[in-house]
Amino acid sequence: MAYFCKDCSYRGKKSGQAGECPACGSFNLAKRRDIGREEAPPPRWRVVLVLLLWGILGTLVLSKIIE
Ligand SMILES: [Zn+2]
């Protein structure tokens, strides 16, 4: 994630302590993803794992309700 100032066109990975532009002090900052370094989608096994865990949780909750 990178910051982009709309006022002075500052670009950098850091913002000020209060989220302001370190170059001009403006709060007109936009967060941008690094160009050319897009985040890869989560790997498939993680999606499967999350679904599996939710399935187990759901089954446990259902069995509690039924009892
Ligand atoms: Zn600025």
Image (cartoon, rainbow, N blue to C red):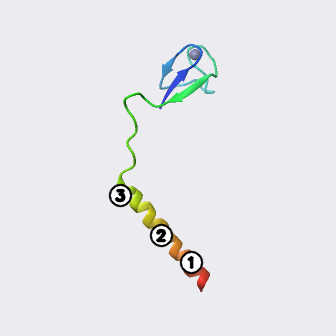
Q: CA distance from mark 2 to mark 3?
A: 15 Å
For image coordinates 60% across by 13% down, the residue present is: 24
Secondary structure under tag 3 reads helix
Residue 64 higher or lower than 27, as above or below: below
Disc 3 crowd, CA 10 A, few/some/many (<14, 14-19, 20+): few
Q: Quadrant of residue 36?
A: top left
Disc 1 crowd, CA 10 A, few/some/many (<14, 14-19, 20+): few
Question: Is the C-beta of the residue carrying label 1 under 8 Å from the nearest atom of ligand 1?
Answer: no
- Whichever of callouts 2 and 3 sits on the residue coming sooner in the sequence is 3
Residue named by callout 2: 55
Residue named by callout 3: 45
Q: Amino acid at mark 2?
A: Gly
Q: Amino acid at mark 3?
A: Trp
Q: Which mark is residue 62?
A: 1
For image coordinates 35% across by 58% down, the residue present is: 45
Image coordinates of residue 53 in percent, x first then y, are: 46, 66
Q: Are marks 1 and 2 in contact (CB under 8 Å)?
A: no
Secondary structure under tag 1 reads helix
